[in-house]
C-alpha cells in the first residue's frame, strides 16, 4: 500500500480529526516526495503541528517510533524530528506549552533518572533533551513535566559527588544557567567577565539591554558590576570606564572582520561571532559576500539570508522591539515567517532554513544531519562544553581585531604639525591603549545615568 492510500485510510478512520488544509498539505507533500525521491523533503511546507501528526500516522517508517528513536534515525526520522521541533518551538512561545505537551500523539521512552550514575550523564541528557535544554535551574525545579524529577535525581547524584570531592552543588552544576545569581559575592573583574561570557542570559548583551532585562538577571548583574567597578576605581572615571569595557560589549552596531581572502561587514556583533564560528568549523572556508554570506534569496537587494552552508540557509535575527513592530512583526515567530516568505528564488526551493535569535542555537545547527557531515572532521563530535569555549574564543578574536583596527584608525587620524602620521605610544600612563574608554562606553554610561536620574 502506497502512502496516498495510507493517507486516505487514516483520514477515513477519523474524518473530523484533521482540517481540509492539513490533509491537502500532506497530500501535496507525498506527491512531491514521490516525484522527487532524491531531493530533501520540503518540511517547510508543513504549517501546523497537525500536518506533522497526520504524516507521522501515515508513514509506516515513522509511525509508532518514539521521539528518542526518531532523533537517532538517519533515514528520514531525524529530519522529521528536527522540522517538528522547529515548529513546536514557535508554537511553544505562543501557547507556553512544552514540546511533550504539543506532541502527546507521539509515544515516549520513559526516562529512568535512577539509571544515571554521574553528573556527566545528566549534562548529556540536559543538552540533548528538548524538554530540558536551556531551562534555568529555577525553571527545572518548578517544571512538573519532567524537569523537577530531573532536578531531584541530579541533586541526589551531586550529594554523593560532593562527599567525594568536597565540591558544592553550585560548583558541580555550573553548566546550569541561573536566574538570580548573587553577583555581589564576586571578588574581581575576572569573575564578572567569566560570568558574562558563559551565561547565555548575559553574553553579548550591551549595557542598555542588560538594564532592560529584569526577568533573567541582566539588570542585577549590571548593577553589581557597576557598583564593584566604581568601588575599585576610587573615583577615577577613566579607570571605571575602562574596567567596564573589559567585561561588557558596548555596541551591537555594524562590525566587520577580515577572513584573509576578504573583509565582511556584519549587521551585528553576534552575527559576526557566528561567522567566525562557522569559519572555524570549516563550514565557511572562504566567506564571500553574496555567495555564502548575505545571500540574496529573492533578487531584491533589501532581502538576504545571513549564511549559506551547503543546502542550509541560516538567518540570525532576534526580534527588534524598535524596528520589527513598525513592519508589522511582533515576535520572533513572525520574523521567522517574514524571512521564510522572502526565500522566493527557485534556486533555494529545496534548501533547509534555520532562523535563530541566540548564538547558542548554532550548536543545534551543527548537529543537524544536513550540516554536520560538512564540518571539519575534528569538530563533528563537538560537545556543548567545547562549543561554549569556542564562543568565548570567537569573542576574544573579534575584540582583538577591533582593538587592532582602532589603533590603526588612531594612527591614521592623528598627525604631526607637518602632516605626517604620528606614532601613538602603546601606553598612556598606567593603562594600555585597549583599556581606554571608547565613545561607545562614555555614551552608554551617560544614557544609563540619565535613565537612573529620571527614575
Image (cartoon, rainbow, N blue to C red):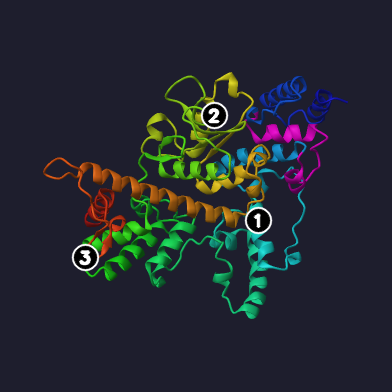
| Residue located beneath label 3 in the image | 236
> Vertical placement of 11 versus 234: above or below?
above
Tell whether position 70 is magenta.
yes
Q: Which mark is residue 145?
A: 1
Of 199 and 232, nearer the camera is: 232
- The residue that appears at 74% across and 24% down in the rendered structure is 33
Task: Please indicate whether residue 333 sits to the left or right of residue 146 in the image.
Answer: left
Question: Residue 134 placed where, x, y %?
Answer: 57, 54
Q: Which residues are magenta?
A: 46-74
Question: Residue 375 placed where, x, y %?
Answer: 63, 42
Label 2 Cα crowd, 10 Å radius (few <14 / some 14-19 / many 20+): some
Q: How many dots with numbers?
A: 3
Looking at the rendered image, the disc whose residue lies closer to the viewer, 1 or 2, is 2
Quadrant, the C terminus: bottom left
Work out how far the residue at label 3 is from the one at label 1, CA to CA, in angstroms. 51 Å
| Residue located beneath label 2 in the image | 340
> Vertical placement of 16 versus 206: above or below?
above
Q: Quadrant of residue 28?
A: top right
- The residue that appears at 44% across and 50% down in the rendered structure is 397
Check disc 3 and report its element: helix, strand or loop.
loop
Amino acid at each position: 500500500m502506497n502512502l496516498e492510500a495510507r493517507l486516505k485510510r487514516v483520514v477515513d478512520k477519523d474524518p473530523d480529526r484533521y482540517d481540509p488544509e492539513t490533509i491537502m498539505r500532506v497530500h501535496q507533500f507525498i506527491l512531491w516526495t514521490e516525484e522527487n525521491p532524491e531531493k530533501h523533503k520540503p518540511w517547510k511546507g508543513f504549517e501546523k503541528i497537525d500536518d506533522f501528526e497526520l504524516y507521522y500516522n501515515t508513514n509506516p517508517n515513522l509511525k509508532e517510533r518514539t521521539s528518542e528513536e526518531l532523533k537517532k534515525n538517519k533515514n528520514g526520522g531525524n529530519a522529521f524530528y528536527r522540522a517538528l521541533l522547529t515548529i513546536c518551538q514557535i508554537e511553544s512561545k505562543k501557547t507556553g506549552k512544552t514540546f511533550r505537551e504539543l506532541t502527546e500523539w507521539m509515544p515516549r521512552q520513559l526516562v529512568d533518572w535512577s539509571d544515571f550514575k554521574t553528573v556527566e550523564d545528566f549534562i548529556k541528557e540536559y543538552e540533548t533533551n528538548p524538554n530540558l535544554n536551556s531551562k534555568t535551574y529555577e525553571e527545572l525545579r518548578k517544571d512538573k513535566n519532567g524537569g523537577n524529577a530531573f532536578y531531584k535525581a541530579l541533586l541526589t547524584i551531586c550529594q554523593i559527588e560532593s562527599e567525594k570531592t568536597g565540591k558544592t552543588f553550585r560548583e558541580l552544576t555550573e553548566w546550569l544557567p541561573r536566574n538570580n545569581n548573587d553577583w555581589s559575592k564576586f571578588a574581581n573583574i575576572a569573575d564578572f567577565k567569566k560570568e558574562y561570557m558563559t551565561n547565555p542570559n548575559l553574553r553579548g548583551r550591551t549595557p542598555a539591554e542588560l538594564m532592560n532585562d529584569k526577568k533573567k538577571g541582566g539588570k542585577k548583574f549590571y548593577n553589581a558590576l557597576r557598583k564593584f567597578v566604581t568601588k575599585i576605581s576610587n573615583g577615577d572615571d577613566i579607570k571605571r570606564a575602562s574596567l567596564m569595557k573589559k567585561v561588557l560589549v558596548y555596541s551591537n552596531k555594524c562590525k566587520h572582520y577580515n577572513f584573509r581572502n576578504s573583509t565582511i561587514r556584519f549587521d551585528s556583533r553576534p552575527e559576526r561571532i557566528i561567522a567566525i564560528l562557522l569559519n572555524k568549523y570549516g563550514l565557511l572556508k572562504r566567506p564571500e559576500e553574496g555567495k555564502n554570506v548575505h545571500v540574496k534569496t529573492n533578487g531584491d537587494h533589501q532581502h538576504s539570508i545571513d549564511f549559506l552552508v551547503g543546502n542550509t540557509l541560516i538567518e540570525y535575527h532576534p526580534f527588534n522591539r524598535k524596528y520589527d513592530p513598525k513592519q508589522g512583526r511582533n515576535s520572533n515567530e513572525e520574523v521567522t515567517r517574514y524571512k521564510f516568505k522572502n526565500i522566493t528564488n527557485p534556486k533555494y526551493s529545496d534548501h533547509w532554513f534555520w532562523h535563530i535569535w541566540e548564538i547558542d542555537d548554532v550548536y543545534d545547527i551543527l548537529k543537524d544531519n544536513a550540516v554536520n557531515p560538512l564540518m571539519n572532521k575534528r569538530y563533528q563530535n563537538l560537545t556543548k562544553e567545547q562549543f561554549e569555549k569556542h564562543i568565548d574564543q570567537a569573542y576574544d578574536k573579534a575584540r582583538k581585531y577591533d582593538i587592532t583596527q582602532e589603533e590603526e584608525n588612531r594612527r591614521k587620524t592623528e598627525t604631526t604639525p607637518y602632516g605626517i602620521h604620528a606614532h601613538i605610544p602603546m601606553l598612556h600612563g598606567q593603562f594600555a591603549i585597549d583599556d581606554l574608554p571608547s565613545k561607545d562606553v562614555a555614551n552608554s554610561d551617560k544614557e544609563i545615568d540619565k535613565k537612573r536620574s529620571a527614575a
